[in-house]
């Protein structure tokens, strides 16, 4: 029996965070409920140490666990996104959990385990690892969605998320089995080699389609988006904040890795399907968001639309020499979306008093007068989500549209731009309410929340004005991987 080269040193950030989560789970047994914030600060420490380990890792691409994991520029960039998102959400949770009386020490280890799943998804070079990572990412989120056990809405969201997630996982496992039957392997490199010899077969295409179904559920793309509005609305807002950024980014990270590396030789077969998902998600997400009265449901349908815009860049994968640029565009878009979305949800958390007070779109009326700082920040986030200059969201949309134009999908870009105009209606309505309508006085947000909002707003503006160095770094880091 040949023992595979584990290369544990290369996976040190992943191993450290996994161990830290286990230790935190045990330590939480001795921490009283009124001192849960100690677990929160320990979580921040673990995430910061992991970020340092990722940044200090050598730039050379490596493989671990017998080629099942890849440690390269693409995975490291996504790791920083996952860890940064987890850190900001942890800071937000320190006050939110206490305010809503759901302080439970298991919140923080579950969050870390989910981050570990996200990190391994970005590194996965084997379909089995992709599935295991997807489950490690999802199962803690099922529990976190039902964190507010006394609330019916939280219980309902957890049950819906679990049942539909299990259903989607079954599709993906079946798809992996079909791909294995067609190629005799679950390794992405071996799958590519098999396709190069035997070409496309109906069995292979069926497997690819079912694998894609699992990914579409995770990223909330139409027509597998049914869970998104209900789960976003029913789950605690702090959980929704983490879920809306981390789960979506991890899903697209795995999509890029699997389809750009493993299925690149049959891109002509799956690219039109990606284009259909893109146009359906942008149309359904944006049109349905117009009629929403809850800010949570509006942001949920907004996330569906943004999944569609990301699919616009995915269609360029594996086609000619444009895969690296398409992957860079996806990563840049995920960073832009994470900044704007976490910032917007942070403001929702600041305004939320109960399940019914502070979560209606009408509650934003007069925000710019009662709290100018939050009003200005929310304006920046809304402009970025819309895709208007001078924000990071505008540049992100430009890059994903350019990736699609490079491979001849100009019609898809034109249709997507039309849906951006639709989204402007419900996004700008929030700005009108904040600046031009009278509303109730709203208390200022706590200090940790202010830090998160300011950091997200400054980043969204800074990289919107100076995107060149960031995109250049992304292209340099990802060059030659896909």
Image (tube, rainbow, N blue to C red):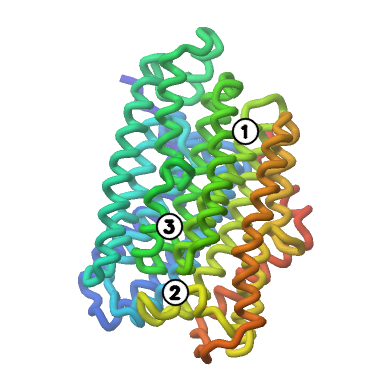
Q: Residue furthest top?
A: 198
Query: Which quarter of the figure has residue 196?
Result: top right
Looking at the rendered structure, the secondary structure element under dot 1 is loop
Residue at x 78%, y 60% (from the top left corner): 466
Where residue 320 appears, as percent x and y from the top left, is 70, 24
Q: Quadrant of the C terminus?
A: top right
Cα gap from disc 2 to disc 3, whole angstroms: 18 Å
The earlier-in-sequence mark between 1 and 2 is 1
Note whether 354 is above or below 67 in the view shown. below
* Discs 1/2, front: 2
Q: Residue 385 location, x and y as percent?
A: 62, 60
Element carrying mark 3: helix
Quarter occupied by the N terminus: top left
Q: Residues within 10 Å of mark 2 (few under 14, many from 20)?
A: many
The residue wearing badge 1 is: 315
Give the numbered dot on residue 243: 3
Which residue is at a point 70% across and 48% down the rendered structure image?
417
The picture places residue 233, in percent across and down from the top left corner, at 39, 64
Task: Kindly indicate the quadrant of the structure image that contains residue 140.
Answer: bottom left
Which residue is located at x 63 percent, y 27 percent? Answer: 318
Q: Name the residue nearer the viewer: 217 or 58.
A: 217
Is the residue under label 2 in contact with that under label 1 (CB below 8 Å)? no
Q: Residue furthest front?
A: 291
| Percent x, y of residue 112 | 38, 58
The answer to whether the residue labelled 2 contacts the one labelled 3, judged by CB atoms less than 8 Å apart, is no
Q: For this rendering, which residue is in front, 103 or 404?
A: 404
């Amino acid at each position: 029996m040949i023992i595979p080269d584990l290369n544990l040193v290369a996976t040190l950030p992943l191993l450290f965070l996994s161990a830290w989560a286990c230790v935190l789970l045990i330590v939480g047994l001795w921490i009283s409920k009124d001192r849960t914030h100690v677990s929160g600060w320990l979580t921040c420490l673990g995430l910061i140490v992991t970020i340092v380990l990722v940044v200090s890792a050598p730039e050379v691409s490596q493989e671990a666990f017998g080629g099942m994991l890849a440690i390269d520029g693409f995975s490291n960039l996504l790791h920083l996104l996952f860890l940064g998102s987890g850190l900001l959400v942890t800071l937000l949770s320190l006050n939110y959990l206490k305010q809503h009386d759901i302080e439970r020490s298991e919140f923080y280890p579950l969050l870390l385990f989910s981050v570990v799943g996200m990190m391994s998804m970005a590194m996965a070079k084997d379909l089995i690892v992709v599935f295991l990572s997807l489950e490690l990412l999802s199962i803690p989120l099922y529990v976190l969605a039902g964190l507010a056990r006394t609330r019916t809405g939280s219980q309902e969201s957890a049950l819906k998320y679990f049942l539909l997630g299990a259903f989607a996982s079954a599709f993906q496992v079946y798809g992996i089995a079909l791909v294995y039957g067609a190629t005799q392997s679950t390794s992405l490199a071996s799958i590519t080699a098999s396709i190069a010899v035997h070409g496309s077969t109906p069995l292979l295409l069926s497997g690819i389609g079912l694998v894609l179904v699992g990914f579409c559920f995770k990223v909330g793309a139409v027509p597998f988006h049914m869970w998104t509005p209900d789960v976003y609305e029913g789950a605690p807002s702090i959980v929704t904040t983490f879920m809306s950024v981390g789960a979506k980014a991890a899903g697209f990270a795995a999509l890029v890795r699997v389809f750009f590396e493993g299925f690149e030789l049959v891109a002509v077969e799956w690219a039109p399907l990606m284009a259909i998902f893109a146009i359906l998600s942008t149309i359904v997400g944006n049109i349905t968001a117009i009629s929403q009265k809850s800010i949570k449901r509006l942001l949920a349908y907004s996330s569906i639309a943004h999944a569609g815009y990301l699919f616009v860049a995915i269609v360029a994968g594996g086609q000619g020499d444009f895969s690296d640029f398409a992957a860079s565009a996806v990563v840049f878009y995920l960073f832009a979306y994470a900044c704007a979305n976490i910032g917007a949800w942070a403001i929702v958390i600041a305004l939320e008093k109960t399940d019914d007070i502070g979560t209606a779109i009408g509650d934003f009326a007069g925000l710019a007068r009662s709290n100018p700082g939050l009003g200005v920040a929310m304006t920046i986030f809304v402009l970025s989500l819309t895709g208007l200059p001078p924000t990071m969201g505008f540049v992100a949309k430009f890059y994903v549209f350019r990736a699609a134009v490079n491979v001849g999908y100009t019609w898809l870009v034109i249709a997507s731009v039309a849906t951006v105009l639709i989204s402007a209606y419900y996004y700008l309505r929030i700005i009108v309410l904040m600046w031009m309508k009278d509303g109730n006085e709203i208390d200022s947000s706590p200090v940790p929340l202010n830090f998160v909002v300011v950091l997200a707003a400054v980043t969204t503006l800074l990289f919107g004005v100076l995107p060149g160095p960031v995109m250049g770094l992304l292209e340099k880091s990802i060059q030659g991987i896909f």
